[in-house]
Image (cartoon, grey):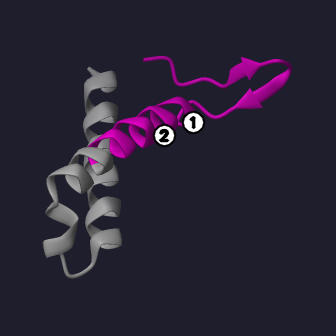
Amino acid sequence: MRFSEINLFGVYVAPIALPLVAAWVIAIGLRWIAAYCGLLRYLWLPSLFLFSVYMIVLSSLLLLAGR
């Protein structure tokens, strides 16, 4: 993976921005699946669970991109 700035229509974007957006899209899909299955009803703090899922997805993407 290239760790230099990305030129997006004349604006330089940090290289972490693309994995952040990709992890966000994946986490939204997982949140939809969890809500559909009823998993979020049984959690004490659903927002903390969803944040941790986002962090797990993001770190997994970054580990895969680093190889």
User: The N terminus lies in which quarter of the figure?
Assistant: top left
Where is 2 relative to 57, above or below?
above
State the SS at label 1. Answer: helix
At 23% from the left and 45% from the top, the residue drawn is 33
Circle 2 Cα neighbour tier, 10 Å, few/some/many (<14 / 14–19 / ≥20): some
- Tell me, yes or no, whether the two marked residues, 1 and 2, touch with CB atoms within 8 Å: yes
Dot 1 amino acid type: Ala
Q: Which residues are magenta?
A: 1-30
User: The C terminus lies in which quarter of the figure?
Assistant: top left
Is 43 in front, or is 11?
43
State the SS at label 2. Answer: helix
Is 38 in front, or is 53?
38
At 35% from the left and 70% from the top, the residue drawn is 47
Looking at the image, residue 56 sits to the left or right of residue 27; the answer is left
| Residue 6 image position (x, y, % from top left) | 67, 21
Can residue 3 be found in the magenta stretch?
yes
Looking at the image, residue 62 sits to the left or right of residue 56; the answer is right
Circle 1 Cα neighbour tier, 10 Å, few/some/many (<14 / 14–19 / ≥20): few
At 74% from the left and 19% from the top, the residue drawn is 7
Q: CA distance from mark 1 to mark 2?
A: 5 Å
Looking at this view, name the residue that lies furthest to the bottom: 44
Where is 61 relative to 28, above or below?
above
The residue indicated by pointer 1 is: 17
| Residue 61 image position (x, y, % from top left) | 31, 32
Looking at the image, residue 60 sits to the left or right of residue 15; the answer is left
| Residue 8 image position (x, y, % from top left) | 75, 20
| Residue 34 image position (x, y, % from top left) | 21, 52
Can residue 12 be found in the magenta stretch?
yes
Dot 2 amino acid type: Leu
At 25% from the left and 56% from the top, the residue drawn is 35
The residue indicated by pointer 2 is: 20
| Image mark for residue 49 | none
